[in-house]
Amino acid sequence: MKKYFKTALILLAVSVANAQQVHPDAKYAQAELIQKKANGFKGIWYMNQPSNDEYVYKYSGGLAVYPANHRPFAIYSKVVNKTFFCFGGTDDSNSTLLHNVSYFDHKTGKVANPVILLDKKTTDAHDNPVISIDDQGHIWIFSTAHGVNRPSYIHKSKKPYDIEAFETINATELVDGKEQPFNNFSYFQVYPIKGKGFIALFTKYNKQGHRVIGFNTSKDGQRWNEWKVLAHIEDGHYQVSAESDGKVGVAFDYHPKGKGLNYRTNLQYLETSDFGKTWQNIKGEPMQLPLTESKNQAVVHDYASEKLNCYLLDITFDKKQKPAILVISSKGFQAGPGNAPRNWTLYRAKNDKWESSIVTTSDSNYDMGSVYVESDKVLKVIGPSVDGPQAYNPGGEVAMWLSKDGGKTWAKEKQLTERSERNHSYVRKPSHARPDFYSIWADGHGRKPSESFLYFSNKKGDVFRLPRNSNDAMITPEKLK
């Protein structure tokens, strides 16, 4: 009975917040549909929380493909042999966030001049877009919000596999059984499931400002079902997720009650193979949702007992559809050497148990990279794990780490960038990544506003930079030496 009332209170609190969400008549800056060429790749520079010390900000830099909780930024389509991607762009003065859409043509090795889809009327990189492709080949762009003060948007390409023109989708979701505008979602992660539609994991803010994590499904991307809560433990969560052949796995932390949102700890995992109808832990045990207690059967590692923060980086599946989760742990949220070591730790599911290993260490909690399971034995991690020009700020120099024994031991295979002027940050893996477009990221100064370039690498670790200015329809990337 006690658990029933607690669950009811969670749903009631979120319903109240839903009622307060933005709508088309809200008195906030409405995004502007642009739909014109960007004439180059200009990444957004963003900062959060001035720290009043030598590091200047809690985190900052070129955050065009930030945060880790937005997924995916890029997705490969075999039908047209292109990797479509989106990113948070800007103008020459970094005055606003522009949602850009482009693609890499694997046949020619060239990249399409981006289309500016939307002016989001903010410089907050938490409003960065994510991308998806439906069964018919239409490109979908989901433009997120950060909390309830700005609207979210959904756009769909007018033609399959085409980025030139989009239509606005006036989506709805069911709230207490009634259709309401679906125009406010944060930290969006969306996956097309063949023959079923979309499943999306995202965050809603309740009236206390807690980040409540859950999911929703839609057959057509326009009419969404009732949002279901995955977890609301103490003061809320961040989550990262992945999809493979219809299976969706989600890793999440929690905010301890009363400590503020900079404190995040523990690592937990859930998965579904039936479009969200049922959820299990790694042992296949059914989980009763929402989870509301920190001690539960989804816990992968109890960082709280070690008094450590846990930062979610990436999650993927191996060939056997077993998850691999990459996190950073540290002693606290503040920048600087005082909270070292910051361990990059990989968790893999083996025989329904979790095995872990330290990949490397780095100097910031926000040094985000991606994990690649190339075979049962060969794994790679690509990320800014080498100290960069702005030490202890997010990012650094990008390196590729290799394991040949299934993730037990690691060695640096190659350093991809060096002698950079600005930190490289948030190295993202495309969905269904191909060898010639294997990761994408941006750079930016860690301690002051700066210009930001976009980069991608191939599987071998060759790095290519995209020009900030170009009028060409198809652009040849610059290979770094």
Image (spheres, rainbow, N blue to C red):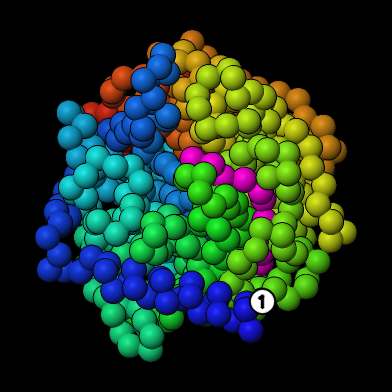
Is 403 placed above or below 424 here?
A: below
For image coordinates 31% across by 64% down, the residue present is 184
**x, y (%) of residue 288?**
66, 76
Q: How many marks?
A: 1
Q: Residue furthest top?
A: 419
- Name which residue lies at 76% across and 25% down: 411
Q: Position of residue 448 (x, y in %)?
A: 31, 19
Q: Quadrant of the N terminus?
A: bottom right
The outermost residue toward the right is 351
- The crowd level at tag 1 (other Cα within 10 Å; few <14, some 14-19, many 20+) is few
Q: Position of residue 391 (x, y in %)?
A: 50, 15
Residue at the spot 28% in from the left edge and 46% down from the top edge: 100
The residue pinned by badge 1 equals 288
Q: Residue furthest bottom?
A: 177
Q: Nearer the viewer, residue 107 or 215?
A: 215
At mark 1, the secondary structure is loop
* Residue 449 at least partly seen: yes
Amino acid carrying label 1: it is Gln
Tell me which secondary structure the magenta stretch mostly adopts.
strand
Closer to the camera, 400 or 223? 223
Q: Which residues are magenta?
A: 262-271
- Classify 216 as above or below 376: below
Q: Give left or right: position of 63 versus 332.
A: left
Tell me, yes or no, whether the highlighted magenta stretch contains residue 227: no
Q: Position of residue 129 (x, y in %)?
A: 35, 52
| Residue 462 in view, yes or no | no
Quarter of the view holding residue 367: top right
Give left or right: position of 95 versus 314.
left
Asked if 2 appears above or below 117 in the picture, the reply is below
Q: Residue at x 47, y 22 (%)?
A: 393
Of residues 347 and 233, the one nearer the viewer is 233
